[in-house]
Image (cartoon, rainbow, N blue to C red):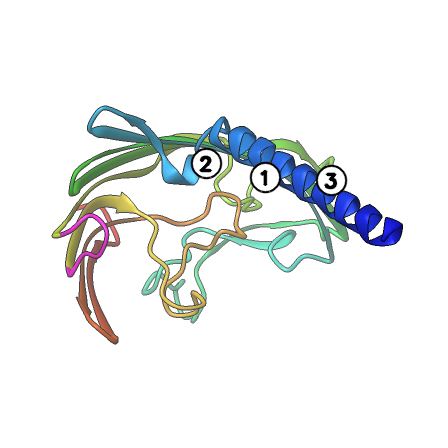
Amino acid sequence: MPSERRKQTVARILAGLSAATVSLASSSAAAQLEELEQGLAVGEWTFYPSLEVRVRGEYRRDPVDAGGDVYARTAIQHEGYLSAAPTVLRRDPTVSDLWLASERVRLGLGVELHVLTARLVLQDSRTLGLAPGLPSAVEVGGLGVLEPFEAYLDVRTDVDDPTLRVRLGRQEVRWGDGRLLGDSDWSARGRSLDAARMMLDFGEVDVELVAAMLAAP
């Protein structure tokens, strides 16, 4: 009997501790802030702030795009006279070791109201350091640029499960693993397109149409 009473007492204590733990966990969880991916609701508006900072260092041994011949123009149909290559302006010394350090900062804000969403993302990408004596003609990814990386307006038929969605403006476009059409996130500036997109959902089938401006008129 004493052992049975002892077991009952221990069981009651454990049950009380479990209830207290659940109560404390639920109260602390209720006090946590919303995740940024869920947005910050203010009345009928929802705001989506974002901040991305990336610092990257690169080292290249015998780079193919540094040193050697520097051409006047590399566009198609700009070959030199009696040659299949463009005119050579000069010949730079061979570069054996190349390094650079760069940064990329993206600061953005998205605003959502019912089925309408607007988003603006500013991007700053700059070179922090280059290999000493590097030729000035070497392409380093277009660094030293402050520009709008995304600026679009998005409209959909439903908030939670849209059947039709239309997005117009500068935006990232990525299909699958990005081989055919991707965002080139590995590069210094990434890639965004001035495009119009229409996305349709037919249950198990999704259809997306994209019309992009590849060059300024």
Identify the image quadrant of residue 48: top left
Quarter-wise, where is residue 203 in the image?
A: bottom left
Q: Earlier in the sequence, mark 1 or mark 2?
A: 1
Q: Is residue 104 left or right of residue 215?
A: right
**Residue denoted by label 2:** 35
For marks 1 and 2, give the CA distance.
22 Å
- Residue 1 visible? The answer is yes
Q: On the image, numbered disc 1 is attached to which residue?
A: 22
Mark found first going from the N terminus, 3 or 2: 3
For the residue marked with disc 1, what is the amino acid?
Val
Amino acid under disc 3: Ile
> Residue placed at 70% from the left, 49% from the top?
93
Task: Work out how far the residue at label 1 is from the one at label 3, CA to CA, in angstroms.
Answer: 14 Å
Label 1: state its secondary structure.
helix
Mark 2, secondary structure of its residue = loop
Was residue 66 drawn as part of the magenta stretch in this picture? no
The percent coordinates of residue 195 (x first, y second) are 22, 51
The image shows residue 104, relative to residue 205, as above or below, that is above
The residue sitting at 77% across, 43% down in the picture is 9
The residue pinned by badge 3 equals 13
Q: Which residues are magenta?
A: 158-163
Relative to the observer, which residue lies in front, 67 or 216? 216
Q: Secondary structure at mark 3?
A: helix
Q: Is residue 177 above or below residue 130?
A: below
Percent of width and height locating residue 132: 74, 35
What residue is rendered at 85% in x and 53% in y? 1
